[in-house]
Image (cartoon, rainbow, N blue to C red):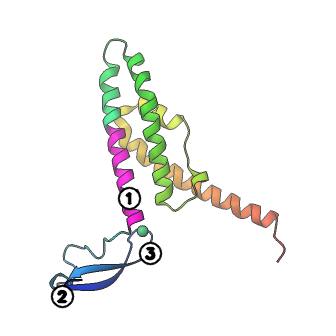
C-alpha cells in the first residue's frame, strides 16, 4: 500500500459481500465524487456482469444479422444456419442471468422457444431479453416455492 492510499470498507453493490478497497486518500476525502466506492463490485459479480453484457451484445449483433439475411435469397435457410450460434448465446445469457441472481445452476430457465423468438422477431431482441428477465425471476420464485413445499411435505426429523 502506498502512503497516499487509504483502505476503505465497502460492499459489493450486487451481492452485498463486504469488500476492502484501496482508495487514494485525496479521493476518499472528497466523499466519493465518481461513486467508485458505492458502485464497487466483487470479482465474481463483475465477471457475471461482463458475461451478461457481452452475451447480450452478441445476441443483438446476431439478431441484426438475422434481420439482414432474412431479406436475402434463401433467407430462411440462411437464418437456420445461424440458429445453433444464437441458441448457444441465449443459453449462456440464461446461465449468466441465473448466476447474477445467485440461483442454482439447476434453475436456469432455458428452452428453445427463447432463441426461436429472437430469430422470429430479431428487431425486438432487447425487448425479448427484458421479457426474459421477468419470466426468469418468476421462474426462480416458483422454484423456491416448490423447494419449500418439498421441505414441508417431507420434514426431516430433528
Ligand atoms: Zn458481489
On screen, residue 41 above or below 66: below
Count of numbered labels shown in the rendering: 3
User: Disc 3 and disc 2: Cα gap in Å?
Assistant: 27 Å
The local secondary structure at tag 1 comes to helix
User: Disc 1 and disc 2: Cα gap in Å?
Assistant: 30 Å
N-terminal label among 3 and 2: 2
How crowded pointer 2 is (Cα within 10 Å; few <14, some 14-19, many 20+) is rated as few
Q: Is the magenta stretch mostly helix, strand or loop?
A: helix
Mark 2 sits on what residue?
Answer: 3
The local secondary structure at tag 2 comes to loop
Mark 3 sits on what residue?
Answer: 17
Q: Does the residue labelled 3 lie within 8 Å of ligand 1?
A: yes
The reply, left or right, for residue 143 in relation to residue 12 is right
On screen, residue 13 above or below 57: below
Q: Residue at x 38, y 66 (%)?
A: 43
The local secondary structure at tag 3 comes to loop
On screen, residue 17 above or below 148: below
| Residue 72, image quadrant | top left
Q: Nearer the viewer, residue 36 or 44?
A: 44
Q: Where is residue 48 in the image (x, y as percent from the top left)?
A: 41, 57
Q: Position of residue 53 (x, y in %)?
A: 34, 51
* Quadrant hosting ligand 1: bottom left
Q: Residue at x 23, y 80 (%)?
A: 23
Amino acid at each position: 500500500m502506498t502512503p497516499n492510499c487509504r483502505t476503505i470498507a465497502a460492499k459489493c453493490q450486487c451481492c452485498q459481500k463486504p469488500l476492502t478497497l484501496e482508495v487514494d486518500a485525496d479521493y476518499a476525502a472528497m466523499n466519493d465524487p465518481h461513486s467508485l466506492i458505492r458502485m464497487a463490485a466483487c470479482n465474481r459479480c463483475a465477471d457475471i456482469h461482463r458475461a451478461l453484457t457481452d452475451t447480450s451484445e452478441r445476441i443483438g449483433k446476431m439478431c441484426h444479422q438475422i434481420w439482414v439475411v432474412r431479406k436475402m435469397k434463401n433467407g430462411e435457410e440462411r437464418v437456420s444456419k445461424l440458429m445453433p450460434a444464437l441458441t448457444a448465446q441465449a443459453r449462456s445469457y440464461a446461465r449468466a442471468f441465473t448466476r447474477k441472481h445467485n440461483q442454482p445452476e439447476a434453475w436456469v430457465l432455458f428452452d428453445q422457444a427463447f432463441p426461436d423468438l429472437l430469430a422470429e422477431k430479431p428487431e425486438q431482441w432487447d425487448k425479448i431479453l427484458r421479457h426474459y428477465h421477468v419470466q426468469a425471476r418468476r421462474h426462480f420464485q416458483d422454484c423456491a416455492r416448490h423447494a419449500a413445499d418439498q421441505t414441508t411435505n417431507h420434514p426431516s426429523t430433528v
